[in-house]
Each structure stands twice: as structure tokens, then as C-alpha cells.
Image (tube, rainbow, N blue to C red):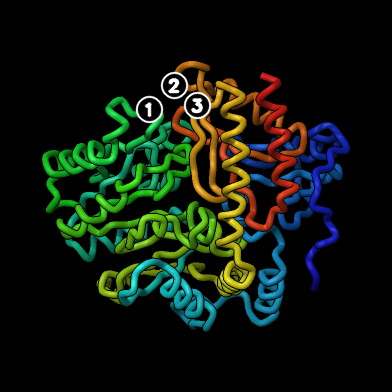
Amino acid sequence: MTVKTHIPQERRVVTAIPGPKSQEVLARRSEATSGGLGLSIPVVIESAADAILVDIDGNHIIDLGSGIGVTNIGNTSQRVVDRVIAQVQEFTHTCFTVAPYINYIEVCELLNKHTPGTFKKKSLLVNSGAEAVENAIKVARHYTKRQAIVVFEHSYHGRTNLTMALTAKNMPYKEGFGPFAPEIYRVPMPYSLHWVGDKATITQDALDLVTHKIDKEIGAHNVAAILIEPIQGEGGFVVPPKGFLPGLQKYSNDNGIIFIADEVQTGFARTGHMFAVEEEGVVPDMIVTAKGIAGGLPLAAVTGRAEIMDSVHAAGLGGTYGGNPVACAAALGVFETIIEDGLIARAQHIGKILGDSLRALATKYPVIGEVRGRGAMQAIELVVPGTTQPNPEAMQKIIKYCHSKGVLVLNAGTYANVVRFLPPLVITDELLLDAMSVLDEALASL
């Protein structure tokens, strides 16, 4: 089967967004699905290829969200489609812990090979990023015989009970859903735009503050793991200052603490490296991955030092669908595509176009308080001009304008004032620049 390469990689708005057909189906959605589900863009998608989504009204929409950082290699990528079809024709499920199959093992071998670190590694496959985070915490606690987990302000780690405790933002993720799991401790994140101290010494000041809080308020000897996103996702693409992650890793190593990198959104070439921690040569004890791992199929992983991953008793880990064979087939297609098509370099190229475009807009529009991110993971934070006061109203207007013109962008941020850009790594330069021209119009419309 050949994927829908006939879908032209161009923006085309043929009806108002939402169009009449989408409005009709969205009314059915409202009747049939939980009111607790959110909605970013009011369209109903019929087909997609690479960086274009086609809705049921025929609108061709530029996808700068990638399903929240999932379709890194583009939608309906040929190798993924081919491998998934072949696997579906063989078998769809046995449960790996009942009757194993080879592509689960092959995915783990690739994760062990491509994650940072030359030491012996082993992996575990599960269904979602939140499930992977939970398993990483389980393993870290089992290995260290400690209970405390340290996380950061502005972090996002999932929506399950444990991961809601790890996640910082209350609304909409935690409001009314407590009580939450205990022994979770939150420490400050060096967030440059809102840092109240001297920005020239932010790295050391933040490290001193974090380690002091751990030492005095928790006790380092009680901490099983420090969990951090190398670039925070839902928190607003907050990038730690240079030296902060290496400093955290050293502190962890010095105190017998497992250092866990949550690369759910940053992984698989998204930031211009296979994994974002590579930017500063950080080597986590454990790394959590999901989203971009399987081209849109549900799969996630925990990869770590072999002695840590082997510390759990037999049958202590697992789950019915974890590492489903169809999802594993897709993941093999993802790895193949990233490596053979040079998508790490492509992410760096996209990063330059995206970064240059956003910085140019920041000089033109004072409502942009900061441009940040790396590679194909960048954002603008919107402020009241001349201040650092969050401007969520501007964010809402910009996103609504972009959507109306056929450009899908996502919001983010603790203060609901960040527009984030996660284009597929196969997006053309022309399509990306067209999207930036619409963003320019949106900013001008303010």
C-alpha cells in the first residue's frame, strides 16, 4: 500500500473553519463524548500526510502540533504504514509476558543503543508516557529502597494519580482530582523570563537553591529519584540554563539518587538530537520516552542502567498491552526513518528557520516576551508589552486567528500565555515559512 502522498503539501482553506461538515460532526461529538475532553481546533480530520491535515470539509491545514509531538516523522509515514500492515496480517496481540515476539525485543535493542550512555542498558515497553513515568518511579524506588521523588515547578508528567502528583499545573490537570500520591517534592525551576534573581548567575543560584531544599527539607539520603524534562513541554517549553542539567546529574550521582530524564516530548530527533539531554552531554540513569516513538501508535518506554532495570523481581513489571506488536512494528519504522532520512539534521535545519522567524517577529511585536526552545520544539511567550506580565488573552487571539487561516498551533504554559510549535520533521521549508507568515498576520491583528 502507498500512503496518501497525493495530498499536496500546501495550505488550502476552502470553507470557514470550522466548516459545515465539521460543525455537524462536532455536534455529535458533544452528544457522545465526555465533556471533560478538550478541543484545540474545531475541525474533524479525514486524512493526513506529512505536515498537512485534511478535514472533512476539504480544508488543508498546516500541522504545527504533530499530535502534541507524536508524528515527528510526519503523518502516515511510508515505512510505518508498511510495517504496521505487515504486522497486522501476522498477529495483533499475544501479550509479551505471555508469549513474546521479536519486534518488542528489537525496539528495546534500538532504545538501548541510541539512548545516551555507553553502559549496559535494558528497556521496558508500556502504553503511554504517564505509564512509563510511573514505571520509572516504581523501579527507582525498588532499586534505591527510598521513597522521595523530586520534581520541578512548571513540570508535566501525565494525568494518572501518581503523575498528577508529579505534574505542577493545577488547572486543568489536577483540579478536583485529589488526593494525590505522597512523597513527591517540588523544587524551583530556573525559568529565565520570570527569574527574580540575577540572570547572570541563574545556573549556580538555581542549583544552590534546589540542592539546599533537598538537603534540608527532604534529606538527600531519602530521595529515590530526581525527575526532570530536559525542555519542559506543557510548562511552556522552558529551557533550563546551560549547566543546570549537568549540575543536577552530578548532585544525583554524588548522593545515590537516580537521575531520570522525561523525554516524552523532547525525544526522537525533536530538538535536533535523538534525545534532548545530548545537548550538554548529560547521561541519565533512566530515560522515559513515548509520543514520537511509534508514529502515532500508543507506545512508551523506560530505558535505564541494566542493574537498575534488573533490580525488580520477575513479574513485578508488565501489562496486557505494553509493547503491543503493531505499535512495536511502527516504532521500528520510526527508528528507520529518523536514521535513514537524516531527520536529526533536518530538525536542526527546521530549528534555524523557526528560530530566525520567531526572533524576527519578537523584534517587531513587543507582545512576544521570549522566544525559546531548540530544533523543531520552540515557543513564544506572550506578555503585556513592556512587562513580563503574562498575556493569555493575546495567546487565545493568536491561536484562534491561526486556526481560522488553516494553521494548527498549540497553547502551553503555566500562565496560559505560550504558543508552542512542534512541526513534523518532514515539513517543507515553504510550508513552514507560510505558517510563519500567518503567525505574523495573527500578531499584527492584535
- Report the Cα–Cα distance between label 3 and label 2: 7 Å
Asked if residue 302 lies left or right of residue 220, the reply is right
| Residue 275 appears in the picture as rendered | yes
Assign the C terminus to one quadrant of the image: top right
| Residue 28 appears in the picture as rendered | no
- 3 and 2 marks in contact (CB < 8 Å): yes
Q: Which residue is mark 3?
A: 369
Asked if residue 95 lies left or right of residue 80, the reply is left
| Residue 174, image x, y percentages | 42, 36
Q: For numbered disc 1, what is the local secondary structure?
A: helix
Q: Which residue is mark 2?
A: 388
Circle 2 crowding by C-alpha within 10 Å: few under 14, some 14–19, many from 20:
some
Find residue 238 and report its image quarter.
Answer: top left
Tell me: residue 174, above or below residue 283.
above
Which of marks 1 and 2 precedes in the sequence?
1
Q: Nearer the viewer, residue 326 or 221?
A: 221
Tell me: residue 279, above or below residue 439.
below
Which of marks 3 and 1 precedes in the sequence?
1
- Report the Cα–Cα distance between label 1 and label 3: 10 Å
Q: For numbered disc 3, what is the local secondary structure?
A: strand
Q: Amino acid at mark 1?
A: His
Tell me: residue 445, above or below residue 108.
above
Marking on residue 47: none
Q: Which residue is mark 1?
A: 194
- 2 and 1 marks in contact (CB < 8 Å): yes
